[in-house]
Image (spheres, rainbow, N blue to C red):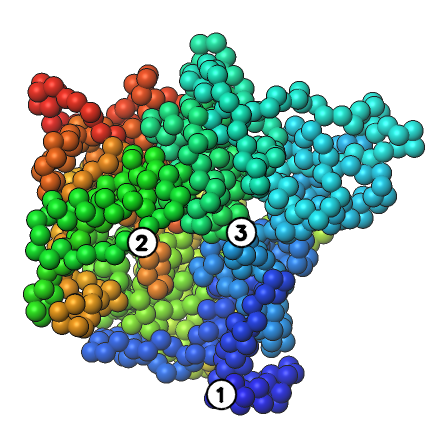
Amino acid sequence: MTIRDSSVLMMENGGSCLPCTPDEERQIVQDLKNQSELDLKEGNLYFLISTRWYRSWERYVCGDEPSIDNISFDSPHMNGVSSKRAERPGPIDNSDIIQNGNGSSEGDDLEVRRNLEEGQDYVLVPQQVWEKLFCWYKGGPALPRKMISEGIVNEKRVEVFLLCLKLIDSRDNSQTVIRMSKKASTRQLYEKVCKLRGIEQEKARIWDYFNKQRSTSPLDVSDQTLDDAMLQMDQDILLEVQVDNGISMDSTGNDLALVPIEPSRSSLTIAGGPALSNGHTTSYRFNQYPGSSFGSTFMDMDDGYDSYNTAKKGEKGGLAGLQNLGNTCFMNSALQCLVHTPDLAQYFLGDYSDEINTENPLGMHGELALAFGDLLRKLWSSGRTAVAPRAFKGKLARFAPQFSGYNQHDSQELLAFLLDGLHEDLNRVKQKPYIEMKDSGGRPDEEVANECWKNHKARNDSLIVDVFQGQYKSTLVCPVCSKVSITFDPFMYLTLPLPSTVTRTMTVTVFYANGSGLPMPFTVTLMKHGCCKDLILALSTACCLMIDEGLLLAEVYNHQIFRFFENPAELISSIKDDEHIVAYRFDRKQGGKIKLEIVNRWQEKSASDYLKGSERKLFGAPLVTYLEEEHLSGADIDIAVSKLLSPLRRTYSSAKAHGGKENGFLPEVIDELSNSHNESVETAELEDLCSRELSFQLSLTDERISSCKPIQKDSILKPGKHIKVLLDWTDEVHELYDPSYIKDLPVVHKTGFTVKKTRQEAISLFSCLDAFLTEEPLGPDDMWYCPQCKEHRQATKKLDLWMLPDVLVFHLKRFSYSRYLKNKLDTFVNFPILNLDLSKYMKSKDGESYVYDLFAISNHYGGLGGGHYTAYAKLIDENRWYHFDDSHVSPVSEGDIKTSAAYVLFYRRVKSKTKAEMAETSQGHCC
């Protein structure tokens, strides 16, 4: 169907809320998305929709995933992939992505949960798509967000997380949370605050109250954006209101003089001011750049609070933490590693003003280098006082919008940007010459390598090149004509793959669909690119499945079955680590009968419940069984529930009610009888159920539990493939059965923040380096153009180390990405702390030392999206390690810095070693 055809369709069906077929819905939405892509501009509205609901809609309009060829399935309900579409989803449900979890309010009044990831937790749809989906399905709540422009390149992106500010009214100290776009102006902030507090704008003064410290002057009523005003997520702002006598009053009635509370700062140099070393000041010179955007102001480089505080007498510099400004631990970790790089610290604590390159079109006009230098000087001069890097974060967002906002980012990606940006801002080459690269042409490697490095230095000459850049040899061989191409390329860091870790550990709780046993969690390991059939086979072995039994996989969400994995070809990569997966163990003969789902519910009681009705809430995992009868009565459901609950039956269920006896017998006797005559007792109970009223309070409900109909003994249930019943756990049921067995389902894979050293799974840094240097064919998407064949070929590529820098950075490639899943490898990498000797890897012999000592580590704990970054750094003068966790800084022993959280490793060349010291090998320090 063409866009034109679908527009006609939208006028006929989509233009109203008339029902559409799944194919029509899919086509209408796709065409609206295509149209919105043609008109991307600032101010466009987008809406957040929960991925859970949106995926269920996609399954409805697109049908099941195509089957995988040549897969056979044994169980009756797994014989191929059904072509039947999923059921039509219910109303749009965004409750799982908003902070308060309900839809009592809309839009800006709702706070979206922090740490959400697009694609995994939510999708963004254009306004027209939202309106269409809402027209068809209703629900919500609506979560509109605007497209904004960020950075000097005006990069377009949707502002998912609004800026939250805590307004403190100085009159009564009341606090109100205000949510606005960071691109809103201070004028709009004044308007919103004054309207909220019912005051005249002329009498209001709003102060930046970051860290409970008032700025030197109130915010101007202007078009300056809140972002440019450096207001941060969740920070305080202070409202003062002028009274008739011209004096503002605080909550106690005392006068508040509208004057700055900070001492004035003396003028400081923009670059290379006081050369600070452990708190001592040397001479400096002031230097400004006429015509530059930072030449006349220093406040855009400073947050207004973190002035240069001289370290107290006896205090060492370099021990200041960095405040977290809202998911900025990734930035803090990267910065602490760079700040504690001795060569960078020495350079930026000195006078580097002559090397600022304001004209480089590839740079940031020197502003990034100035902001970094300013921040480094504060960290080395403020003793142990934590620094808030607001000005640096503002510069970063301006030049690298990908790191703006309040999402978690990758510390290594930031490091790569900072090193490259600092290089361009400090590039001593003002005019880069054009140099035509030559082929190696069979010349000696030394000649080609020197030529390539000379050409590189002719265009790139900075402190960063001097300290961080090395050179490797790249050899490409054509598989057809055997043409060999050799190049020598510079590198800033080495990204090392972790030797093949291709398995995934998953925990699934197995339930008995016939009530013959207690639920039990099983943890299995399988190929991470496997499918649901592989998971079922692994579980079958783990739980000793009988030959006549099968397993039905399902995802539990909000104590209900969210979906059954009835397509055995579905990839397990679609299952996230934080989801709850269960498997129901059933008799294969019952696989094609009626499926009964029992959802558990109880009443939450409180002291006020006697005055008003208590609230019923779902809990625990649902129970599932198969029923054979086509015409079911309430008594049949009651018997099925009793069978499912039988494993949960308490041993002394009625002891309290009968004074320590149960049916006239002592508890010991009951215990003996229950052990020896369990089957006969259960049979008698089931027969007794048929002759009296129902034992449980049961209600028939629909897929979304939007309506409930009590089930009586003689109730006749309409036949269907899936029956959903609510079971109310009354006090009597609680007394008879123990619900703890169906509570607290384990997640698929739990990743803790405290990462243990798993020596059994440990690999060495050398094995990672070997994997990096191993010859391998290029991928189909990375073909090489052979100059001899005149065609693109899938050549083989081999890398070799040729020249190493003074500071060598290793990036351990822990994160992997696929269509369905982002995954993190927590494999422990055993790396040397001292005497990392790389001599055997070097292809050139230039007389340099290739022995390195570790001095900094960027750590990543936890999983993707919700993880946390810290840093370990060594103060060279003290020969002591410290742990930098945002604002908190603490000493750490050298033996504790090796964990499976190590992500980026910083090594420094050991300039000279005696023979005795060289005898102490790297292996001696890997334990």
Q: Residue 174 lies in what quarter of the image?
A: top right
Tell me the number on the disc at residue 57: none
The amino acid type, in three-letter code, at marker 1 is: Thr
Q: Is residue 801 left or right of residue 855?
A: left
Image check: 179 left or right of 559?
right
Q: Residue at x 63, y 76 (%)?
A: 135
Q: Which residue carries the number 2 mark? A: 434
Instruction: Name the amino acid, label 3.
Output: Gly
Q: Residue at x 56, y 68 (%)?
A: 40
Q: Are marks 3 and 2 in contact (CB under 8 Å)?
A: no
Percent of width and height locating residue 371: 50, 35
Determine which of the numbered discs, if any, sits on residue 2 in the image: 1
Q: Which residue is mark 3?
A: 151
State which tag comes first along the sequence, 1 or 2: 1
- Vertical position of residue 177 compared to residue 93: above or below: above
Residue lying at 36% horizontally and 63% vertically, measured from the top left: 820
Q: Which mark is nearer the camera, 3 or 1?
A: 3
The local secondary structure at tag 1 comes to loop
Q: Looking at numbered disc 2 in the image, what kind of residue is underneath it?
A: Tyr
Q: Position of residue 70 (x, y in %)?
A: 20, 78
Q: Are marks 1 and 2 in contact (CB under 8 Å)?
A: no
Using the image, determine if residue 154 lies above or below residue 406.
Answer: below
Asked if 716 appears above or below 809 in the picture, the reply is below
